[in-house]
Amino acid sequence: MDSALRPFAPAIPDRLAAETVQAMDAADPLADRRSLFALPAGLVYLDGNSLGPPTVTMVERYTDFLVNEWGARLIGGWYEGWMALPERLGDRIGRLIGAPAGATIVADSTSINLYKAARAALALRSDRRVVLIDEADFPTDRYVLAAAARDAGMAVRAMPARRLQEAVEADVALVAFSHVDYRTAAERPLAAIVDAAHAAGALVLVDLSHSAGVLPVDLADSGADFAVGCGYKFLNGGPGAPAFLSVRPDLLGETRSPIPGWMAHADPFAFAGEFEPAAGIRRFACGTPPVLGLQALAIALEAFADCAIPALAAKARRLGSLLLATLAAEGAAGKARLISPTAEDRRGAQISLAHPHAAALMAALAERGVIGDFRPPDIMRFGFSPLILRYEDVWRAGRILARLLLEHETQAGPAV
């Protein structure tokens, strides 16, 4: 087995030292991937769950595209490969999320794709009245799903994610949720929710924005009907990178996008007066492909070559455990409240801690070269991109965070 395909979850000893974590890095089958990325010297970047970094080759390759493809070929590029990019990259992302070939397209933003998928799903269950959602899901997801339900003449029923399985009733048309909670990193039981929804005759739409490229998903095995996700987090496609949309293949023949743009037409260049949807996943395209963004994403996805998702997930989750172990070893356990699951197999590639002065602590970390992010009112988020992070990086970050937590407790009293 190729070393990059082998899950690697080294034991974390009670005593942590530089030599210990350096040995973990030396045995890491993904260690060589770090050199593919352009990272500022001395910085520990724990925010890849918000925006992934560029690859080293991005500037050269992107410049080459600007000069030799767009610059030299001009409009001829449309006839030499640009038009096929949404489906070609869709298949590449499909391999990372366990979707069959021809089931995924890269287009638009996550929000637009969410609306398209939701409306397509609701049209297949037009005799029902309810869209079931996670009450604490990412705000945009809740806004878009509420709009899709309203536009379809349905209502939204919101509840805690842990109750989604048991809450699917005969009036539910669609169950929609994020595979990983953006605040806590709690992973939802995708296959179990799909089974419960299908047993009641409902469809499932899952947001994979915090899963794609870092966690095992296997859309085909789970039977999920629709999936969306972004290209700029763990996929490293750049700020505002195009998003993806995936549809269960046996549904494609009967689904319709609510935004029938010309690129979704069976024959776009016939400029026909009436819309006829394309066969397959291209019917979920819309306007002109955003070639600049697609090219950047294509370059970024090359970093995943010969990597297996279980290996990426094993490292990402173990990096999270190392952060917690480092805090404990430095005497800072309990100085901030852990709101992520402790069990590795129940959380995504992130650790979230709550602290009443989280914003100030994150600013202090940034001053010391550790970049995570703050989510109001009191959440510190640390994301673990397994392609770019070393175990030593996370150990260093944990020691700095521990010192800040202990200093803050001395100055301001214990954390609540």
Image (spheres, helix red, strand yellow):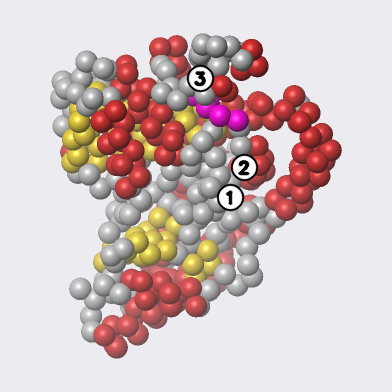
Note whether residue 311 is visible. Answer: no
Asked whether the beta carbons under mark 2 and mark 1 sit within 8 Å of each other, the answer is yes
Separation of residues labelled 2 and 3 (CA atoms): 20 Å
> In the figure, residue 408 lies in which quadrant?
bottom left
Which disc is residue 293 wearing? 2
Question: Which residue matches tag 3?
Answer: 283
In the depicted structure, whether residue 249 falls above or below residue 404:
above
Horizontal relation, residue 283 to residue 141: left or right: right
> In the figure, residue 34 lies in which quadrant?
bottom right
Note whether residue 71 is visible. Answer: yes
In the depicted structure, whether residue 17 falls above or below residue 387:
below
Q: Nearer the viewer, mark 1 or mark 3?
A: 3
Front-most of residues 14 and 151 = 151
Question: Which residue matches tag 1?
Answer: 238
The stretch in magenta equals 282-288
Separation of residues labelled 2 and 1 (CA atoms): 8 Å
